[in-house]
């Protein structure tokens, strides 16, 4: 029983890491939207993020729906964390 709990916890932490990596890469891609060659960098970043994400899900889940659920919950939690801590800086205006 303890081994399965540890494996589920590892899958959850792996999903959290995948999510943080995915959303940090997305933020990095979108932060340079006004530079030359944005579309190419965005598309390469998109396919790289998708490849890493799907490969990570595949290996972390390893054919188990319980582990897939743990990875998905970790990824979703990473989305909320990234939304909270990676907000764009507010522009201040002088009055």
Image (tube, helix red, strand yellow):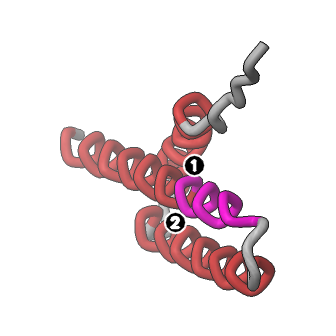
Read off the magenta span.
Answer: 23-33
Quarter occupied by the C terminus: top right
Residue under label 2, please give it.
Answer: 57
Image-based side of 13 in relation to 78, left or right: left
Residue at x 55%, y 68% (from the top left corner): 53
- 31 is within the stretch colored magenta: yes
| Main secondary structure along the magenta-highlighted residues | helix
Residue at x 70%, y 61% (from the top left corner): 30
Residue under label 1, please give it.
Answer: 72
Q: Report which quarter residue 65 is drawn in.
A: bottom right
Measured from the top left, where is residue 44 in percent x and y?
66, 84
Q: Which numbered disc, 1 or 2, marks the residue that appears first in the sequence?
A: 2
Asked whether 84 or 56 is in front, the reply is 84
Quarter occupied by the N terminus: top left
Measured from the top left, where is residue 94 in percent x and y?
73, 19
Q: Is residue 54 above or below residue 25?
A: below
């Amino acid at each position: 029983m303890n081994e399965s709990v540890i494996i589920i916890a590892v899958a959850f932490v792996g999903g959290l890491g995948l999510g943080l990596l995915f959303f940090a890469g997305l933020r990095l891609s979108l932060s340079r939207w006004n530079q030359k060659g944005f579309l190419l960098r965005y598309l390469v970043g998109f396919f790289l993020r998708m490849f890493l994400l799907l490969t990570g899900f595949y290996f972390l889940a390893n054919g188990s729906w319980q582990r897939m659920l743990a990875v998905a919950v970790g990824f979703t939690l990473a989305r909320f964390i990234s939304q909270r801590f990676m907000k764009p800086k507010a522009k201040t205006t002088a009055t």
